[in-house]
Image (cartoon, rainbow, N blue to C red):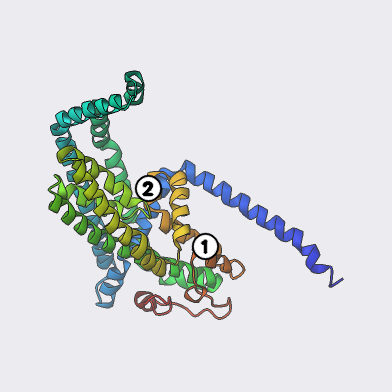
């Protein structure tokens, strides 16, 4: 009988895996239909977690918890508003500058047409290729996107409101954490590990984004390409998009280099961008970010595509934090599935591997220093 026990339990285990897979798919379908709510809520949670060390530091200085929470909330608000203001200014400058290069665009259009005719391409084929492209239509589209004030105001208002709610709820989490640690100690350890990793992710990406933006602005200034500040802000914002963000931030200034200067300047700019951003975004940053958050490059890229489909445009921004959260809840919280984290780039030594009976209680002071999280 004992020899047949493992064989008899294998189908049940397989059925449980199928049930779990079906449940995950059902959850993802639900997230897809409410992505307009999930995205700002999750972004608010990660931002509040990132600002939490400041709140804990103020608490350690005997500042009242409500006051420290309000200060942390204001800091998050100011950072969001500063980034939004910079992006809006950059967009306005870009839209206002486009009409100045309309004549240059028409000249380049005629030159390209003459070159294609000289190579034997028929006029009908050229017209067919370019029939769907209209410079005026492109300008109108960009202007329309910039003028969708209602959408951006609604999103920003919802985000700020969620940040306020989450910040208030996290004013004092010692009681909730103690109760969770008593009932599900591994889940408590995994969530604490997630909070530290997502915090380090935002900090590392912000530092890299600022450094790369400054270097890119130096390249653009050297080449005398207009709207240097605009493209620097674009490089900083797109730095939060893993793997492909620098490509998105490179295309608009490359087009501006072609319109404002010449083809040679554009080629030099693209080459310089590729060297700097490839080394920073594809070599150095993935290594540093991977060590900080425990995700390899393959997992990061797959998460970028996956969450962009599920969440939408914000999925590209939240790809790594969302993957870290799912990894913490689905894999790290259960000793039976924790080994799957290895294939995502995780390290079992950095995950809470305490047994259900021996997990020590984690205090707010330990959370602040990060000693028990292994991330100090």
Q: Is 156 drawn above or below residue 1 in the view shown?
A: above
**Residue ID for mark 2:** 314
Task: Report the residue at 21% width, 41% height from top.
Answer: 263
Give the residue displayed 52% in from the left and 45% down from the top. 30
Foreground residue, 134 or 336?
Answer: 134
Query: 229 above or below 207?
Result: above
Q: Residue 52: percent from the left, percent from the top? A: 32, 67
Give the image location of residue 331, x and y in percent: 55, 64
Q: Name the element at disc 1.
A: helix
Picture coordinates of residue 128, whole percent (x, y):
36, 22
Count residues near mark 1 (Cα–Cα under 10 Å), then give few for <14, some for 14-19, many for 20+: some
Rendered residue at 25%/76% (across/down) = 62
The residue to which callout 1 is attached is 329
Contact between labelled residues 1 and 2, with CB atoms less than 8 Å apart: no
Q: Could you say which quadrant of the image residue 376 lies in? A: bottom left
**Element under disc 2:** helix
In-image side of 42 versus 238 (left or right)? right
Sequence-first disc among 2 and 1:
2
Label 2: how many Cα within 10 Å (few below 14, some 14–19, many 20+) = some
In this rendering, the answer to whether 356 lies above or below 90 is below
């Amino acid at each position: 009988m004992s020899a047949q026990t493992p064989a008899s339990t294998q189908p049940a285990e397989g059925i449980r895996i199928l049930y779990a897979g079906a449940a995950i798919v059902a959850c993802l379908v639900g997230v897809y239909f409410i992505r307009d709510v999930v995205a700002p809520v999750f972004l608010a949670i990660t931002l509040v977690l990132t600002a939490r060390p400041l709140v804990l530091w103020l608490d350690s200085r005997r500042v009242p918890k409500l006051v420290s929470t309000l200060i942390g909330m204001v800091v998050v608000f100011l950072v969001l508003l500063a980034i939004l203001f910079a992006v809006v200014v950059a967009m306005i400058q870009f839209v206002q500058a486009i009409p100045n290069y309309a004549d240059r665009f028409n000249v380049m259009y005629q030159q390209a047409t003459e070159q294609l005719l000289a190579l034997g391409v028929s006029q009908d084929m050229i017209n067919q290729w370019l029939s769907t492209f209209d410079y005026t239509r492109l300008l109108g589209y960009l202007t329309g996107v910039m003028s969708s004030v209602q959408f951006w105001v609604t999103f920003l208002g919802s985000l700020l409101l969620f940040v306020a709610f989450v910040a208030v709820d996290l004013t004092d989490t010692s009681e909730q954490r103690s109760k969770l640690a008593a009932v599900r100690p591994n889940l408590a350890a995994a969530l604490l590990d997630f909070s530290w990793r997502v915090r380090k992710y935002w900090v590392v990406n912000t530092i890299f984004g600022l450094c790369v933006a400054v270097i890119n602005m130096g390249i653009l200034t050297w080449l005398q390409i207009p709207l240097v500040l605009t493209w620097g802000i674009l490089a900083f914002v797109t730095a939060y998009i893993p793997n492909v963000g620098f490509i998105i931030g490179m295309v608009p200034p490359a087009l501006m280099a072609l319109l404002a200067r010449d083809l040679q300047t554009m080629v030099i700019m693209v080459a310089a961008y590729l060297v700097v951003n490839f080394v920073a975004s594809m070599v150095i940053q993935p290594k540093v970010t991977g060590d900080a958050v425990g995700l390899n490059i393959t997992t990061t890229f797959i998460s970028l595509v996956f969450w962009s489909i599920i969440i939408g445009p914000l999925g590209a921004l939240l790809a790594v934090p969302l993957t870290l959260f799912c990894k913490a809840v689905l894999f790290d919280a259960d000793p039976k599935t924790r080994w799957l984290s290895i294939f995502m780039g995780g390290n079992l030594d950095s995950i809470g591997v305490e047994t259900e009976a021996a997990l020590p209680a984690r205090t707010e002071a330990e959370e602040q220093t990060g000693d028990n999280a292994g991330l100090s």
